Amino acid sequence: MRIDVITLFPDFIAQCAAFGVTGRAGERGLVSLHAWNPRDYAEGNYRRVDDRPFGGGPGMVMLIDPLRAALAAARAADPTPARVIYLSPQGAPLTQARARELAARERLILLCGRYEGVDERLIEAEVDEELSIGDYVLSGGELAAAVVIDSVARLQEGALSDAESAEQDSFECGLLDCPHYTRPVEHELGRVPDVLLSGNHADIARWRRQEALGRTWQRRPDLLDETALSKADQRLLDE
Ligand code: SAM
């Protein structure tokens, strides 16, 4: 998949492709990342990308034209149609389900705002959806874009090794993940639960499911409201 990012800080985005699973997804050709700086498309000696808001008030607003030209350049770089996403605290929340849907697309363009945000007319004309990474305000869209990039890159087939498989991850089947343990079995901080050492795969699967259900019930009961539990799950939860 190809991801283009419209950003005043292209170096920030380059770092996403430098480490870990996203780095590996890049090396394996599963994700290609490209950054476009609106300042490169701004006019005048100062290459201005922002101006004061009409109506007064604090802060600056990103100008339409440099963003529009950067978007056009990004679109023209590849014939594959792209979904344009503006990272915004006012957008729909990014969820694991949405990350899966986006990961299945061939091409995304992520638009990062700065200052007070982007001129609304550009959003209306060019943006397909707005995405938020949470109910708080960041100073720019780059960190949010990095979150989107990571969440979709790790879902590309071949990005994760078996040991890092995404299937058991939190939210994948509407539950939080179960706890994990590794060596040593005995440690001053505690002992690994016996069932995980038993070699009995059915018992281990049952224990993991029960732990996942219990954790979800304790920490995120809202998820259980949206998840259709089987009778077997209901019994495990009641035990
Ligand atoms: N005035 C805007 C508002 O209150 O909705 C906030 C602007 S914020 C200081 C600057 C930029 O950071 C936004 O244009 C957006 O691209 C990004 N941003 C801030 N918080 C975000 C969030 N929770 N999710 C995604 N992007 C965010």
Image (cartoon, grey):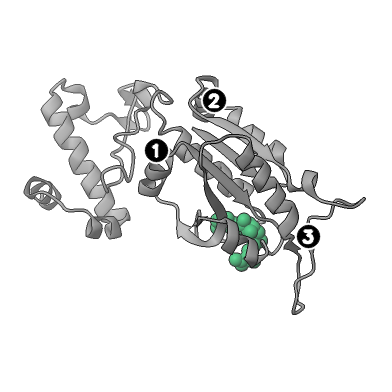
Type of amino acid at the residue the image marks with label 3: Asp
Is label 3 within 8 A of ligand 1 (CB to nearest ligand atom)? Answer: no
Of the four image quadrants, the one with ligand 1 is bottom right
Instruction: Tell me the CA gap for discs 1 and 3.
Output: 34 Å
Type of amino acid at the residue the image marks with label 1: Ala
Query: Which residue occupies the extreme right position in the image?
Result: 45
Q: Is residue 74 visible?
A: yes
Q: Is residue 183 visible?
A: no
SS assignment at label 1: loop
Instruction: Tell me the CA gap for discs 2 and 1.
Output: 16 Å
User: On the image, numbered disc 2 is attached to which residue?
Assistant: 26
Task: Name the N-terminal-most of marks 1 and 3.
Answer: 3
User: On the image, numbered disc 1 is attached to which residue?
Assistant: 104
Neighbourhood count class around disc 2 (C-alpha, 10 Å): few under 14, some 14–19, many 20 upward: many
Task: Name the N-terminal-most of marks 2 and 1.
Answer: 2
Where residue 228 appears, as percent x and y from the top left, is 17, 53
Find residue 50 and name its label.
Answer: 3
Type of amino acid at the residue the image marks with label 2: Gly
* In the foreground, 196 or 109: 109
SS assignment at label 3: strand
